[in-house]
Image (tube, rainbow, N blue to C red):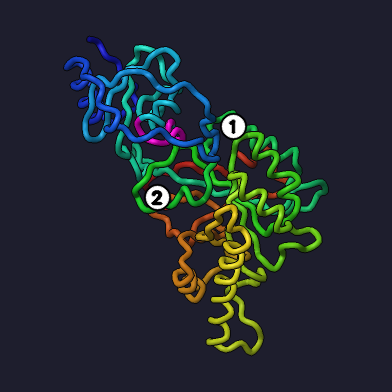
Amino acid sequence: MAVRVGAAACGSFVSLALLAACAGRAPAPPAAAEPPAAPAARAQGRAATPPFPQAAGEVIGRGERLLIYLPHDGDQLPAIAARFLGDADKHWTIAEANGVPRAEAGQPLIVPLQPLNPTGVRNGELQTVPILCYHRFGAGGAKMVVSPANFAAQLDWLARNDYQVLKLSQVAGFLAGREPLPRRSVVITIDDGYESVYRHAWPLLKKHGFTATLFVYTDFIGAADGLSWAQLQEMAASGVIDIQAHSKTHRNLTDRSAGESDERYRQAIETELRAPRELLEKRLAAAKVKVQQFAYPFGDANDVVLDAMSRQRYQLGVTVQPGGNAFFSQPTLLKRTMIFGDLDLDGFKSKLQISRSVSAP
């Protein structure tokens, strides 16, 4: 039989796929050989939204690292990913392996069973993941305040251009060289914990099916213009907002108070990292919040802070140094790009660094 496979697949895998397909149709493996279907898709950029019909096509070739699947009428990539990968949100891995946006009946597809390119190195380029940083939302001309209209326009543009908006936690596997990410991946983060996140940002994120990581400093919770515990609980329970730590008091962690000894400084830093983690996990336990990421106030960290990060079991830390993050980026000193209120849409697009030359610094 003649088989045409998408051009995006890697050469060695294509060869194996073609051999498997041309050898004739193999009987479908028993159900036990396939991962169980995924539960309802997690909140993720342009996440697959059940219900969709169960993938009912045939396996016509299988190897250790991939299989060849012949779609039936009505098959969708999320359903195929749910059947074979156990997660509908991994549909993008099938799309990228085949260079196609959707399944077509009778057109064989490569389904990668193992990561094809977990480091994102392609043709002399490094994949990088931009992490965007917002603070407040609303009217007015303050630099740190993004209008709801501008935020909506930015989300609309991401959606139209097929960006995958991830929680920060989803970048950890990529940084360890284990898990690939969609080529157009971006992380949205919001700092401090202003009430305008609940009033403006959260509804727009839900509308687009996007997610965000919210870094709060716990002394601000319940303040006049700060989020309440009830609002944090509601947003965390929705799965759209991932709540993480931004310190206890928002002090600059690299600055010492007048007369502060080395020991008192170390103890203070330990408290700034430990206290918000313990409090957020306790007060938001019903939403199963686990605090493992930290945003440094003012973006600053030093060796004392990084040592405390390790002791307090934080996996990722973000600065405000702009740029994208390659797989070898230091997990506790990730780059993050500020998004200001006076930024127009062209300026916003310029902040999305999703690749750079291998030879670039």
Q: Residue at x 19, y 16 (%)?
A: 22
Say which residue label 1 marks.
Answer: 159
Q: In front of the other: label 1 or label 2?
A: 2
Which residue is found at the position 56% from the left and 66% from the top? Answer: 277
- Where residue 268 appears, as percent x and y from the top left, is 59, 79
Question: Which label belongs to residue 333?
Answer: none
Callout 2 amino acid: Gly
**Label 1 SS:** helix
Q: Which residues are magenta?
A: 84-91
Examine the rendered structure and indicate whether residue 144 appears above or below residue 93. below
Magenta stretch holds residue 86: yes
Farthest top residue?
1
Task: Name which residue lies at 55% across and 40% down.
Answer: 43
Q: Which residue is mark 2?
A: 173
Q: What residue is at 53 percent from the left and 60 percent from the top?
A: 291
Nearest to the observer: residue 206 or residue 343: 206
State the image coordinates of residue 4 (x, y, percent, origin top left). 30, 15
The x and y percentages for residue 261 are 57, 89
